[in-house]
Amino acid sequence: MDYANLAQMLRRQAERLGPRPALRHKRYGLYRDCSWERYHGEALAGAAALVDAGIAPGERVGLLAENRIDWLIADMAILTAGAVTVSPHAPLTARQAHYQFHDADVVFVVVSGKDQLAKLLSVRAELPALRGIVVLDPAAAGGDVRPWSAFLQQGRRALARLASGLARREQQLGPDDLATVMYTSGTTGNPKGVMLTHGNLVSNCLACLAVQPHHPDDVVLSWLPYTHIYARTVDHYAGIAAGSVLALAESAETLLDNLADVRPTLLAAVPRFYEKVLSAVAGSSPADTGKKLRRLFGGRIDWTSSGGAPLPVPIARAFHEAGLLVLQGYGLTESSPVISFNSKAHHKLGTVGRPLPGVEVVIAPDGEILTRGPHVMKGYWKDPAATAEAIRDDWLYTGDLGKLDADGYLSITGRKKELLVLSNGKKVVPSHLEGLLMSDPCIDQAAVFGEGRNFLTALLVPHWDNVRHALAAEGAPVSGGPEQLADLESVRALLEKRASAALRELSRAEQVKKFLVVPRPFSVEADEMTVSLKLRRGVVGAKYAGRLEELYGE
């Protein structure tokens, strides 16, 4: 089935599936269902309230909130009104959220609660286009900030008067009309506003489902932030297109408990999740590890997906051997996001699958991946120069390096701008080395450096529980917190041995000669990782520049 826009997609599924569950969310300690007809009804009420508040088609509406059922309803309300969603990542600072709202000329904002509201109010005077604010948590409302529940009630009262106008707005929304401006988290510099249309997102959902379908009987456990395009497309919009049940995890911290509660059939995640889970359940044998993994995922899982960053082959292999199929895909915000994806019927370990139907992929002479098709963004908001650099002759230049094999499977070999060139001219791909290092259960995170130097160095964040167990097994038990343990020679010796083993198959130039033990993980909050949990190498390198320089001076 084809759709002209995302609003039409939700309406048609509500008409088709009616009382069947669409969303599942936890409230007062229990998971509760929201039917398709109620989901669409709430989105329609929100759209009516937005129109009643003067929101015109094409105007930008901000959505500053954590994952929750009201986030999904508010997004669909914005789209049903013909407006454009601008959704900064919830942990961003007030100044970072201000940059996005000001740049996008946001005229109305929906926020989650008092913390997000406080951010917005602190910069409100610097947002001249802003005409109104609604807050999802009623306790945070006050003054001219209205509660979401009252806003929806206003929309319900206005529906009879506005129904025909809303129907016209839906009819007039075409594939080329903007659905969202998503600001890339980026590894350097200010974020750019990626303009994604209804046609971009609808086509990407349908192409993903053509490769690997799911259905109304499937339950998708959703936990990645909807402020990132990965979860927005493959969980939120593709879930609507498939008619499957979208169950919301309470948070990333409760995900393992929610897996047991929901017992999903499908799950989308990032490599960091699979690395941490594998490290946490690693048993005395592959069979023991596999048994623990299957129990942890709830017993009904059909397949899971991995995206956002490369999945190290040893991690993927461990899950496959445990009978848990992790299908790796590839994409970026500018491509809505999925470019290629493995499927249950056709998958190859170590690759990100074949290009989706309707998506073209070629490899440029310098190894860069180029893609063309209906998934490619409209451009960067207010930045024609950056758009012209990224899209040439309809081809999107991804900035990633890769290769296509004889069967059409795509492999990612690195990031064009992240290639490290050593002083002897040798080129290495740091993300590949980091993936190998993190495949060791005692290494939780890794960051490799060496641009212009004669050897590589690294920052290693240990998995402290596994380090303690490994040292105890060697007869050298340790105690103390991460800061104390990071200075111990026994810890350094263990990590050196394991890092060398992880990189043993690589060339001499790709060996890490010296490293620092970092006691605490890199995080999004510290600006060391992007929203999609990619390492911000420049930020991390600058933070540890002095200590890395000491390694080269020794």
Image: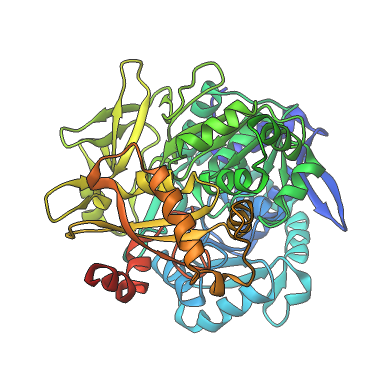
Observer-nearest of 181 and 340? 340
Taking the spot 36% from the left edge, 72% from the top edge, the residue there is 544
Taking the spot 64% from the left edge, 42% from the top edge, the residue there is 282
Taking the spot 42% from the left edge, 45% from the top edge, the residue there is 435
> Residue placed farthest to the front in the image?
475
**x and y, in percent, of residue 457 in the image:** 31, 59
Asked whether the viewer can see residue 238, the reply is: yes
Observer-nearest of 322 and 146? 322
Q: Give the vertical position of 95 relative to 344 (above or below).
A: below
Q: How is the image coloured?
A: rainbow
**x and y, in percent, of residue 101 in the image:** 46, 68
In the image, 519: left or right of 428?
right
Could you tell me which quadrant the N terminus lies in? top right
Could you tell me which quadrant the C terminus lies in? bottom left
**x and y, in percent, of residue 323 in the image:** 65, 25
**x and y, in percent, of residue 359 in the image:** 37, 27
Asked whether the viewer can see residue 175, the reply is: no
In the image, 224: left or right of 250?
left
Observer-nearest of 26 and 410? 410
> Residue placed farthest to the left in the image?
424
Q: Give the vertical position of 304 relative to 113 (above or below).
A: above
Q: Give the vertical position of 194 relative to 397 (above or below).
A: below
Observer-nearest of 423 and 71? 423
Which image quadrant for residue 242? top right
